Amino acid sequence: MNAPGISVLILTKNEQRDLPGALESVAWSDDVHVFDSCSTDDTIEIARAAGAQVHSRVFDDYATHRNAALALPFRYPWLFLLDADERPSSELSTEMQRVVAEAPANTAGFRLRRRDFLFGTWLKHAQISPYYIRLVRVGRARYTRAVNEVLEVDGPVAALLHPLDHFPFSKGLEHWVAKHNTYSTMEAELIVRQQGLQNPSLREALMHQDFHTRRLHQKALFYRMPARPLLKWCYMMFLRGAVLDGMAGVTYATLQSFYEYLIVLKTRELRRGGK
């Protein structure tokens, strides 16, 4: 069944393992675009075989790359943003097709809950950022921040009820660690260059009505705190309740704290001039 009104954008880099499932999950759209970062595996062939339109671009940073993808000529006024390791539930797919037909003219996007999984377990408590804007009007959204990018939408954002499932460990722990090793380098470089918020506000971090604005202030404040990796582990384990997710939650909290420690170490190294 085709779903008039919704195009789909999937960014890829060597995603031959996950892409088939992602494409199958959005088979209801007849305008699927795969924006590839010069894959060396069968990603492009898989996308074309499924009928997707394929575009290629050399990756530079996450915000710039994603903004280039947002500038593609989409067929429909609404765009669903999907990663290769994500799967919209059938209920979410149906809901999206309904809301775009009913949305007020000034509605610029929709936020949904993403459910991260590890060891087959939903990280219900351990997941730090479960809400994401993934359905937007074409031309009303743009990304900022070179890594762990933020999607900014020009206009009101409504909420979707049904979840998007995410499998960040689908390629194994080694792949997750390698990816976050790269992320930590980019985060450290951003910190040293003092990009982002220079004067974060505790009030904005706690009280701002927009979730993503709160996150920006929270992150900026967090980077100024001592013992960040330990604080992050304790926060995830006991305040958010990662321990309630069992071994998967404990593992995820530990991995996230290790990632934070890499940022701390690499920031110190850069400030010492690599010595």
Image: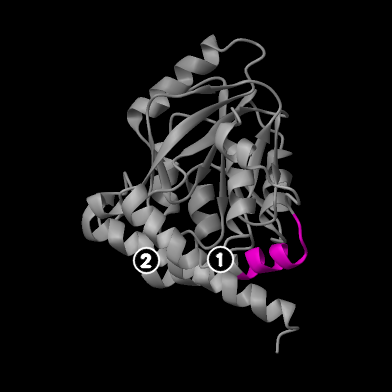
Give the Cα distance between marks 1 and 2.
18 Å
In the picture shown, does residue 215 fall above or below 27? below
What's under tag 2, amino acid-wise? Answer: Thr
Q: Position of residue 110 (x, y in %)?
A: 54, 26
Q: What colour-coding does the image apply?
A: one colour
Is residue 86 at all visible to an observer of this figure? yes
CB atoms at circles 1 and 2 under 8 Å apart? no
Q: Secondary structure at mark 1?
A: loop
Q: Position of residue 27 (x, y in %)?
A: 43, 34
In the picture shown, does residue 132 fall above or below 110? below
In the picture shown, does residue 238 fall above or below 58? above
First to last magenta residue range: 185-195
Q: Nearer the viewer, residue 238 or 2?
A: 238
Name the quadrant containing residue 56.
Answer: bottom right
Q: Position of residue 5 (x, y in %)?
A: 57, 20
Which numbered circle lies on residue 254?
2
Magenta highlight on residue 191: yes
Residue of label 1: 226
What's under tag 1, amino acid-wise? Answer: Pro
Q: Secondary structure at mark 2?
A: helix
Q: Nearer the viewer, residue 90 or 113?
A: 113
Is residue 169 at all visible to an observer of this figure? no
Magenta highlight on residue 43: no
For label 1, the crowd category at 10 Å Cα-Cα, with few meaning under 14, some 14 to 19 and many 20 or more, is few
